[in-house]
Image: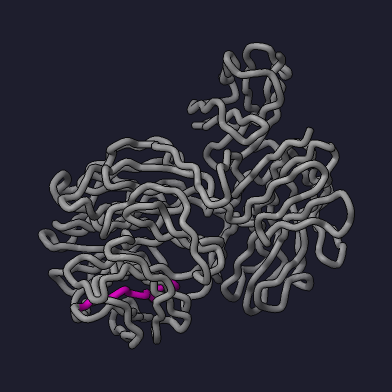
Amino acid sequence: MSKRVVFALAFVLAVASSAEAQWQSIAPNLIGTGPYQNSGAMTYSDGVAWAGLYNLYKSADKGLTWQKVTIPNAGSNNIHGITFYDKNTGIVCDEAGAYVTHDQGQTWQTYFNGNVFFHAAFSGSPNAFVIGSTTTPTSFTSDGGVTWSTHTFVRVAKDFYSVAPGKVIAFIESNTDSHIAYTSDYGVTWTERVGTMDPDSHSFGVVPCDENTIFGINEEGGNYASNNLSEIFMSKDGGASFTSIKQLSLATLSGCIAITPGAIYVPARSNGILQSIDNGVTWKTIAGPNVPIDSRDIITIEDTILLAADINGTIWRTINTAGAGQFSTSSSRVDMSSANVRNDTVGGTALVPIKFKRNGALSDVDFILHYDWYRGLTYVGSFLTSGKQIDVPGTQWNGHSQLHISSADMPVAGPELLGYARFRLYLSEGGCANAWMDSLKFAAPPSACFSYFSDSARSIICSNQSFDAVQVASNAATNAFSLSPNPSNGSTLLRSSTYSGPITVRIVNALGVTVQEIHHHIDTRTPIQMSLEGIPGGEYFIRLDGEHISQTLTLIRLR
């Protein structure tokens, strides 16, 4: 009897169909409702998620739990924008000012008190940032607010995206159109591009590693309705021109956007979220909350988790991106539901691609490959298309392998298939596997924008940044967890020999359904007792997620 197991984006989950996402209500009515069921903002940076409408909340466990953070003038002013440089330094913009923290919200400095601010962005350092207002000129500082450069646009700079130190793309709204402006000198001078979108567009998104590809969202139905359509606009020339690539009925869209290297997400006020996995060429509707108009209430976390707030202020969470890169197996063959995964031409193995895109010179690179396997698959190794194995001997442990790629093996330019992580089928029942990468370490910093990806779980690297901060799970001891007894007929103890801190434990059955979830604190002296009462006998996967750790164990529940 064959069984079907589905895996998407490095997490286990149940999928009803390739066009649906599975969402969980995490924080009912947390942030509240705006006066016109509108506004609110969310963001994520460096392990901490933030959300708010009248008050501010933060989550240090990828959106699972939230705590209130006190900000100036809280309780009555709509929050329009939240942006953070890292986990400690961020800016909140609302209808009474702009507030900056350097200690994760314990204290705040207020700038331009009494003015309405829409959004902000950091540009290369925690002391360089730009903020946009409806009542004062757009203001840019490179010294933490001691001095400011100001610029008055026709109406208001509603959104920002920083592409390099001192260089920022601004999203400008006027009474007649919305368009793009650039600065490369910390806001001293700005250049406005001639490409236009409809007026009253609310947010825009820039494709990572390609600042010329820009998406703008016009929800329509506000004060500046022009053609009675909600639209998605796209520019491939940095805002010199825009094309309407998706049209919907009046007031359908929410006005916000989230972009990962693998997908683009545009929420609607009803009927879920629009998703494109081919850079805007085609779109499909996936499940999701009804996100309010004129909000920034959707974010992605590490390319694998979506958070969104609905019109009641409830925060929802999904670890399924509705078919982006997912694949399934049945019997002894691999069935593709994504072009990112395919059958191997060598019989009996399944492949997950390893691809690179870069411009300019690139040095040797080392990284950690993570992989999960479920029923009937085992990791064989990672190989270049030439057949050369790139696993470093002696550096493999539970679900991890260190890979080394020399500069001579890197593609010259452009997206190019480099090789595959290979998994062998060894049970007639079939199985499923996924692979993703982190912990990059370069012999020298990349000299140009560079991205790497495996399946749909992707990460973006930009030139001359330090990657020490992404060193995660780089040795076997970091993820040394064990279960005992295993097999078990009633309960089992989860132990860690090295890790201490908060941890989320999910017990997942062979169909990918989470049957139990535990949020706890673990250390080397205190194991976690896990009750298996009410869980049927069989094979289960214990998914562990904590601060800089992610691991899967196998547990046998005796009948």
Q: Position of residue 128 (x, y in %)?
A: 34, 67
Residue 82 sits inside the magenta stretch = no
Q: Position of residue 189 (x, y in %)?
A: 29, 84
Number of marks in the rendered image: 0
Q: Is residue 144 visible?
A: no
Determine whether 552 is above or below 295 in the image: above
Picture quadrant of residue 120: bottom left
Residue 395 shown left or right of residue 155 in the figure: right
Q: Position of residue 242 (x, y in %)?
A: 39, 81
Name the quarter where the C terminus is drawn: top right
Name the quarter where the N terminus is drawn: top right
Residue in the foreground of this view, choosing between 476 and 335: 335
Picture quadrant of residue 386: bottom right
Please tell me which residue is depicted at 57% across the width and 46% down the height of the picture: 17
Please tell me which residue is depicted at 50% across the width and 68% down the height of the picture: 208
Residue 36 shown left or right of residue 289 in the figure: left
Q: Is residue 36 visible?
A: yes
Determine whether 269 is above or below 489 in the image: below
Q: What's the magenta region? A: 162-174
Instruction: Give the overall secondary structure of the magenta segment.
Output: strand
Residue 267 shown left or right of residue 386 in the figure: left
Q: Residue furthest top?
A: 490
Please tell me which residue is depicted at 32% across the width and 82% down the height of the picture: 196
Please tell me which residue is depicted at 57% across the width and 59% down the height of the picture: 459
Residue in the foreground of this view, choosing between 45 and 395: 45
Residue 183 shown left or right of residue 366 in the figure: left
Determine whether 244 is above or below 30 in the image: below
Q: Residue furthest left?
A: 114
